[in-house]
Image (cartoon, coloured by chain):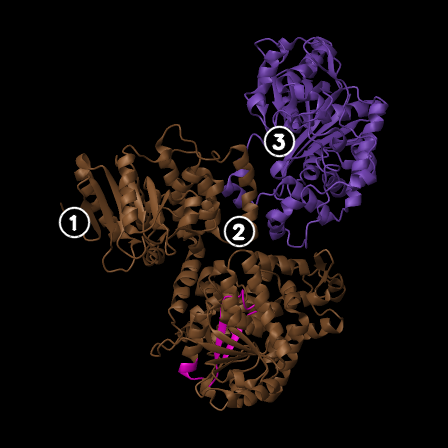
């Protein structure tokens, strides 16, 4: 029997607007990352010298986020020289991939204790600033019929017939669920971001818009109509010939917000938990990663979830809670349509439309979010999934212990 | 000192060498093997004199500076698939220009006339560029229009000189710059008044700049705007392919390759950049699209300009005065185009009021040009003064040519012909503008059918560059020659076809629409029909175009055709059966086209449109059909019909078939036209095989009228 990968804790910073006027703009990415490492130590008593690797996802790993930031964060947190660290980039799936790779290291017996998570300061290193051959190298983008992800999100809505009102209603529900969860203090895994003297910079998510309404959402302008008109729509219709025209329904209100944040999941073997007297919160049951048609780009979560379920010998109905990253409303709606996952089990405490989506950090955040709610409800299985650039998808099934 | 045979080398007393390009046996300088030899000799002479040399001026003894690549040579390499030979030549060209720009003394280009393509690439390899401020001087890199890229360093040097973003008009659009425009764009440095002034300035610059070098050879040099991944460039390059797609539907590889070289060359060393440029060039050289563009847009357009379909033994004539009958949509456009080209025009309608209204159209167009500064008030007045609105037949008495452009009604046209003819000069040529009515039949009403000819204009006349000239059975050669000259005089391209129902362009365009309606009636999703037609390169889908030309017009044409069929004992209506049936059906439903706001689409006040939902009730729209089949049905239908026109003797040359299709109804450029399509598709066998498949699956519309070899044998 292979070694199990247990989750001893899964924490995340609150998320705040990822622009120059966001609360976390003053916190450099390496401090966000070492902040969650130090908070882990505070919550779970373990000797960081036992940590074999700090694996952090980051979608724009350059400049202040560059250079194997997992290692820099470990050093900055004051962890011993013996702790390795790395950074990985699987676009929006980076954080969950970091968790999965950490789990694989434990399952394979390579490491006993690792950190998986992610960090993204979108206010300091704006989205796309790392550059991409897929996006900006004409030979590649032309060959692969590159489309910006928002066009893909609108294409999903068009193909599935989600109207502007449908996606806005989904967004409003995300806001309302998030507001309730925050008000009722459901989130046990959110840790404060502190300054060097221990003063609190931010201790709860401040991107949520509890006062949102259909009127407010309905007044927002479509984000991708102009881009579509420039030529991307016609590239899309060259492949999706059955579509007369793309209905540009996504706006800043029903798409994930641009925010700063970090996450860290402490993953270890059963043996090390016993040795250190740590109580596991969960177990990683199965992991999967898929890739689908890259132009529409965002339909990966359903096949990723189905692949993970098959590996685990489970079905959709076995899952108590789903955390499907709300990159765009249509992504989650498509996931529910494809898998039959019921709306009352999906993103029950809101998602990235309300909280924001700090690209490389989000995957690690979903793990804590689903554990918080499984614990509150006494549920057993949770499934986290994200859509990823170029058509990929990632999923992780977690069992509460 | 030796003198080589193509480039003259003269060293003056100031130590400045002037290399004058004057390639023997050709009226212009071009880039070919001979050029390379001359350049090598010149470089050898320069190197021999280096000790005493202060600088070099590169000049031309031709009217133009340099015409560019040798296109015959390029086509020969393509035909023989001599890819390595072409690559070697390209390497040699690059080595020479690189040697020139690194030779150690200042080099100045003295641009006395057009320096296009390879010619301007030579200029870019010079350290300083002076041009005469003259209307005949122009610079540019038009390679993109032939499906190629400027591979003698043209992309690399212009990106280093201007930056990626500023090099777009030059490289991607293939824009031609006048001398002042080129100076403004940073492509040339200085303007001169004449050749002597230019030479003086060139020498003065050399004396003043003894250490001149290419700016990008300075280690501190930064490309304006930076390399491809600087944030503003990366963002622009992320959007540029979409904008290109909007224009080319990603069917033309050259703009994409040029864009790639622009981006990739910006972040590597100079020699690496040059290699990237050559490798992409080598790729474009192999593309069927460059064959298409060179064959039709270059060679066949040149043939048409040279009058290949015009009787050669008849001298060119100038049309001084033209009478246009009917001041409607077509007549007013014809009057405008004629007056614009310097002809006197009598614009005649049944009342002077109507005729004046027709002239107002010219006024409006000219006022727009005046407002945009494209014409002066004087010019506008002169052009307008040439148009004489009239209601009197007597005013036509000194016209060299009549263009009759009244309604498509045989009886009306006959009546008018008989009424007007007695007022005309005895030698006057009669041209009838029609897209439907047989010319031979129309000519019955004219006393001398040898002077009667069809001139099919396209709407809007002032914008459409093509005229389909139709010879009736008895049309004489001098009438054809005269009309040909007229069409060229109004700066449009004539194609020449023989009489036959629907002639060429209307007949094949009708088949495009007809096939779209076949697909629709078979239950194919209308959005797919439209998108796949556009994806294949048609400017708009068949349903859109029918709404644009008005379904009602198509219905009327159908009625006329049925009457003609009865009268002539023909069954032409069967060729466009779906088109005829469906236009009747749509008009009965009150859906007559865009003007009424209802056709295959619904049109809304905000200018948007969407496919009419009723189409789903009528035809379903869920039929599964492979995308390849839908696309090939739309395209093959047109090509097979074109072959039919050749087979029946309506078309006599492939150039008329190709150019007529490209400019008549927007057949996709990358294919080279409705005849060249066969070669683009993969050749005779591939085409015949696919046509046979479509015939077996979808009906005899796709059957070739005869084996391809037999049809081809009928071409001139």
Badge nearest the viewer, 1 or 2 = 1
Q: Residue at x 46, y 35 (%)?
A: B224
The residue beneath circle 3 is A127
Alpha carbon distance from label 2 to label 3: 28 Å
Pick whichever of labels 1 and 2 is earlier in the sequence. 1
Element marked by disc 2: loop
Would you say residue B174 is visible in this rendering?
Answer: yes
Classify residue B711 as left or right of residue A365: left
Estimate the spatial distance between the alpha carbons at disc 1 and disc 2, rounded to whole Å.
49 Å
Q: Nearer the viewer, mark 1 or mark 3?
A: 1
Q: Residue at x 83, y 23 (%)?
A: A186
Question: Is B606 placed left or right of A84 in the picture?
Answer: right
Element assignment for label 3: loop
Say yes or no: labels 1 and 2 on the same chain.
Answer: yes
Residue A139's spot in the image, x, y percent?
49, 43
Q: Which chain is brown?
A: B
Q: Are marks 1 and 3 in contact (CB under 8 Å)?
A: no
- Residue beneath disc 2: B250
Estimate how packed mark 1 is, as few (under 14), some (14 to 19) or many (20 or more) residues with alpha carbons within 10 Å: few
Looking at the rendering, the stretch of residues picked out in magenta corresponds to: B454-479
Residue ranking furthest to the left: B1
């Amino acid at each position: 029997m292979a070694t199990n990968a247990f989750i001893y804790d899964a924490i995340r910073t609150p998320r705040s607007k990822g622009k120059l006027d966001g609360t976390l703009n003053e916190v450099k990415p390496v401090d966000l990352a070492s902040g969650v490492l130090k908070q882990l130590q505070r919550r779970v008593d373990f000797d960081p010298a036992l940590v074999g690797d700090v694996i952090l996802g980051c979608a724009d790993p350059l400049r202040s986020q560059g250079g194997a930031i997992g290692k820099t964060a470990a050093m900055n947190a004051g962890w011993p020289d013996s702790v390795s660290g790395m950074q990985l980039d699987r676009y929006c799936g980076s954080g969950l991939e970091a968790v999965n790779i950490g789990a694989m290291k434990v399952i394979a017996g390579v490491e006993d204790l690792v950190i998986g998570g992610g960090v993204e300061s979108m206010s300091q290193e704006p989205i796309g600033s790392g550059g991409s051959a897929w996006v900006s190298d004409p030979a590649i983008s032309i060959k692969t019929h590159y489309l910006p992800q928002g066009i893909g999100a609108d294409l999903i809505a068009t193909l599935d017939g989600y109207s502007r009102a449908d996606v806005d209603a989904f967004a409003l529900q995300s806001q309302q669920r998030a507001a309730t969860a925050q008000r009722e203090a459901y989130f046990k895994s959110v840790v404060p971001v502190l300054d060097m003297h221990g003063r609190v910079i931010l201790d709860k998510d401040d991107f949520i818009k509890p006062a949102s309404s259909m009127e407010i959402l309905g007044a927002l302008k479509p984000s991708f109509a102009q881009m579509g008109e420039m030529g991307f729509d016609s590239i899309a219709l060259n492949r999706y010939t059955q579509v007369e025209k793309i209905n540009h329904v996504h706006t800043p209100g029903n798409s994930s917000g641009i925010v700063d944040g970090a996450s860290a999941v402490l993953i270890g073997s059963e043996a090390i938990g016993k040795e250190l007297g740590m109580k596991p919160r969960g177990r990683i049951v199965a992991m999967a990663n898929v890739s689908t048609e890259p132009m529409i780009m965002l339909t990966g979560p359903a096949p990723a979830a189905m692949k993970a379920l098959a590996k685990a010998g489970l079905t959709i109905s076995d899952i108590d809670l789903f955390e499907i990253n709300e990159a765009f409303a249509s992504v989650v709606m498509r996931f529910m349509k494809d898998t039959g996952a019921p709306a009352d089990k999906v993103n029950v405490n809101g998602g990235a439309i309300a909280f924001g989506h700090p690209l490389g950090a989000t995957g690690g955040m979903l793990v804590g979010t689903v554990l918080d709610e499984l614990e509150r409800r006494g549920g057993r299985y949770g499934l986290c999934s994200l859509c990823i650039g170029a058509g990929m998808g990632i999923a992780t099934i977690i069992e509460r212990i | 000192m030796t003198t080589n045979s193509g480039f003259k080398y003269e060293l003056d007393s100031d130590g400045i060498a002037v290399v004058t390009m004057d390639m023997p046996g050709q009226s212009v300088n071009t880039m070919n093997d001979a050029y390379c030899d001359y350049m090598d000799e010149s470089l050898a002479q320069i190197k021999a004199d280096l000790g005493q040399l202060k600088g070099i001026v590169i000049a031309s003894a031709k009217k133009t500076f340099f015409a560019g690549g040798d296109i015959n040579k390029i086509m020969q390499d393509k035909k023989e698939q001599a890819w390595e030979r072409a690559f070697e030549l390209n390497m040699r060209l690059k080595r020479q220009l690189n040697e020139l720009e690194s030779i150690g003394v200042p080099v100045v280009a003295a641009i006395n006339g057009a320096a296009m393509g390879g010619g301007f690439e030579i200029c870019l390899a010079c350290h300083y560029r002076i041009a005469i401020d003259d209307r005949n001087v122009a610079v540019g890199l038009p390679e993109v229009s032939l499906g190629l890229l400027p591979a003698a360093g043209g992309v690399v040097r212009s990106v280093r000189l201007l930056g990626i973003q500023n090099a777009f008009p030059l490289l991607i659009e293939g824009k031609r710059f006048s001398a002042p425009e080129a100076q403004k764009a940073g492509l040339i440095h200085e303007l001169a008044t004449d050749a002597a002034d230019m030479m003086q300035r060139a020498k003065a610059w050399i004396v003043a700049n003894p250490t001149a070098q290419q700016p990008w050879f300075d280690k501190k040099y930064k490309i304006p705007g930076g390399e491809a991944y600087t944030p503003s460039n990366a963002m622009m390059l992320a959007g540029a392919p979409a904008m290109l797609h909007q224009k080319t539907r990603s069917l033309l590889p050259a703009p994409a390759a040029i864009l790639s070289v622009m981006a990739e060359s910006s972040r590597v060393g100079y020699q690496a950049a040059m290699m990237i440029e050559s490798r992409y060039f080598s790729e474009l050289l192999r593309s069927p699209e460059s064959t298409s563009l060179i064959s039709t847009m270059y060679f066949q357009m040149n043939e048409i300009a040279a009058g290949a379909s015009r009787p050669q033994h008849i001298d060119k004539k100038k049309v001084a005065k033209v009478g246009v009958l009917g001041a409607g949509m077509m007549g007013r456009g014809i009057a405008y185009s004629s007056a614009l080209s310097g002809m006197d025009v009598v614009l005649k309608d049944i009342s002077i009021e109507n005729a004046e209204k027709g002239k107002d159209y010219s006024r409006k167009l000219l006022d727009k040009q005046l407002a945009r500064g494209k014409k002066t008030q004087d010019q506008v007045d002169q052009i307008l003064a040439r148009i004489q609105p009239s209601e009197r037949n007597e005013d036509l008495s000194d016209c060299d040519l009549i263009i009759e452009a009244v309604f498509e009604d045989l009886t009306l046209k006959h009546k008018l012909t008989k009424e007007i003819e007695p007022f005309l000069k005895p030698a006057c040529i009669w041209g009838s503008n029609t897209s439907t009515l047989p010319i031979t039949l129309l000519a019955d009403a004219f006393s001398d059918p040898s002077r009667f000819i069809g001139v099919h204009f396209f709407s809007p006349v002032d914008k459409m560059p093509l005229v389909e000239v139709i010879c009736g059975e008895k049309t004489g050669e001098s009438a054809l020659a005269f009309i040909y000259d007229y069409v060229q005089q109004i700066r449009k391209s004539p194609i020449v076809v023989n009489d036959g129902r629907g002639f060429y362009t209307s007949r094949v365009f009708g088949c495009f629409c007809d096939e779209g309606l076949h697909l629709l009636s078979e239950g194919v999703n209308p959005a797919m029909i439209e998108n796949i037609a556009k994806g294949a390169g048609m400017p708009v889908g068949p349903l859109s175009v029918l709404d644009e030309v008005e379904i009602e017009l198509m219905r009327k044409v159908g009625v006329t055709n049925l009457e003609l069929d009865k009268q002539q004992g023909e069954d032409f209506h069967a060729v466009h059966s779906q088109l005829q049936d469906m236009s009747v059906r749509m008009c009965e439903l009150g859906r007559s086209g865009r003007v009424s706001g209802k056709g295959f689409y619904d049109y809304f006040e905000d200018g948007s449109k969407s496919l009419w939902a009723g189409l789903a009730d009528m035809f379903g729209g869920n039929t599964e059909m492979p995308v390849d089949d839908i696309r090939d049905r739309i395209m093959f239908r047109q090509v097979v019909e074109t072959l039919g026109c050749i087979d029946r003797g309506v078309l006599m040359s492939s150039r008329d078939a190709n150019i007529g299709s490209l400019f008549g109804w927007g057949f996709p450029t990358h294919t080279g036209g409705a005849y060249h399509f066969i070669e683009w598709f993969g050749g005779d066998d591939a085409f015949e095989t696919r046509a046979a498949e479509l015939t077996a699956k979808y009906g005899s519309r796709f059957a070739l009228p005869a084996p391809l070899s037999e049809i081809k044998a009928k071409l001139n």
